Structures are given as structure tokens and as C-alpha cells.
Amino acid sequence: MSRNVNSELCRALIQRLSELESERARVLRHLSHELKTPLAALREGISLLQDGVAGPLTTPQQEVVSILANNTRLLQQQIAELLDYHATVLDASRLQLRHVDLRGLVDSVVEAQRLQLQTQSQQVRVECSAGAVLLDPDKMRVALGNLLSNAIAFTPPGGEIVFHISRGASVGKPGSERLFIDCIDSGPGVAEADAAKIFDPFVQGRRRPASGAGGSGVGLSIVREVAMIHGGQVSLVPCAQGAHFRMELPYEE
């Protein structure tokens, strides 16, 4: 009798948790929609001021408008990143596994951010010794895109970013072949005090991006979620210069 009661309580609890998660997702989508409309209007108004539609601006007024434009852009970016993070978490159980040419996938991610790279005169070097692997290409594209975005933000103008993709044995799991995806930038690296929590949601490290503008702190959290749902992990590898992030995944051809 007691076992049946416990089983029913567990089912009820799981059902309630599922309902709460769905409600949270609904509220988040609604909130995002409600924020996007006034943000778009605000950006349009700022753009009109910058174009001189309301008349010429004094130097102090131009500085204020520039600050408003920058803060509005950052807020819009943070909302988008927050939604991306929650979408990744909520969709974690639905993997669409396919055999994917990982070199081609990385190249497409780099190409998608070509403009940002050209603006900063940065170069990306891709080294790949792995062939086609079994993974979810859409989720992996998101993870790789976040790794690259982070590297671009922290790499100084003219710097180099390296993607190194290889296969080999795991240190902790001898006998099992693993896939390693390393992303190495040439920025200031991660402060020792931040290393233990750098993959936690909404955590921003002490060292600032080369541009001076901080993000929302969810990009690396998304990378961790994608690695975990593939049965892998992501870690910060000690590095003499820059930041070195490594995704370690099961290698399945």
C-alpha cells in the first residue's frame, strides 16, 4: 500500500514539475513579446535622433543618444540570449541525431560570423582530424556559434582563434573513444576566481571583452547544456595565453 502511494506521489510531482516548466516557458515567451515591441520603437526613435530628423544635436546630446543606442542594443541582445538558453534547456530531451561532417559544420559557423571577424581583422584557423560523427547538427551549431562569439568578443583586433577537432581516448574513461572540440582564443583568458563558475548561467567574468561590452552570461551555459545532452561535457583547459574551452563528446561514426 505504501509503495503504491509513493508511486502515485512521484507521478503527481513529476506532472506538476512538467506543468510548472511549461508555464515558465509560456511566461518567458509572453514577456519577450511584450518587451520586443517597445524596444523596437525605442531603437527607431534613437535612429531618427541620430539622423537629425528632429534637428541637429549638440555634442552632449549626441553622447547621450549614443549611450541610449548602445544600451538598447545590449538589452535586445540579452533578451535574445536568454530565450536561446531557455529554449536549449527545454528542448534538451529532443535530440535529432544525424551523421554530420564536423569540419563543414564548423566552417558554416565561421562563415555566419564572417562580418564580425572582418570588422575586428581576426582570423579563424580550423584543424580537423575527425570525419563524420553522430550528433544533433542544429544544437551543435548553436554551441559552436556561442564558442566562436565568445572568442571573437575577447580576442583583440588582429588576433587569431583556433578550432581544433580530434578524436582520442578520454583520460577518465580508458578504452572509450571520444570527440574533442577545442576553441582557443588569444584574449586575456579567464580569471582564476571565475574558472569554477564560468559555465553557470548569467555569470560574467572579471575580465572584460576586448570591445568593452559585456554579454548576458548565458553563451557558455548553452555550450554546457548541448554537451551534456550529447552525453559529454565542456571544460576550461589551463592555457598560457587566452581562453581554451574543450567539448568532450562520445565519438560515434
Image: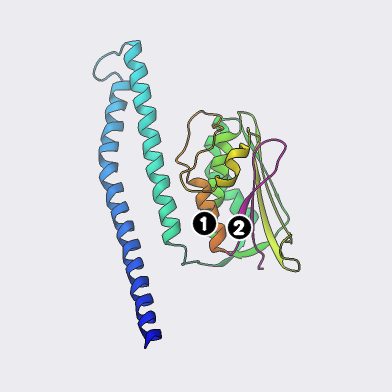
Give the residue number, with chain letter if any, for mark 1.
225
Camera-nearest residue between 229 and 118: 229
Furthest-front residue in this view: 2
Q: Are marks 1 and 2 in contact (CB under 8 Å)?
A: no
Residue 179 lies, with reference to residue 61, above or below; the image says: below
Residues at marks 1 and 2, CA–CA distance in whole angstroms: 8 Å
**For the magenta stretch, what is the residue range?**
231-253
**Way the structure is coloured:** rainbow
On screen, residue 203 versus residue 106, left or right, reads left
Picture coordinates of residue 102, whole percent (x, y): 63, 57
Residue found 57% across the figure and 30% down from its top: 120
Rendered-image quadrant of the N terminus: bottom left
Element carrying mark 2: strand
Residue at 52% across, 56% down: 225
Amino acid carrying label 1: it is Glu
Q: Quadrant of the C terminus?
A: bottom right
Confirm whether residue 231 shows in the render.
Answer: yes
Q: Which mark is residue 137?
A: none
Is 52 within the magenta? no
Residue corresponding to mark 2: 233
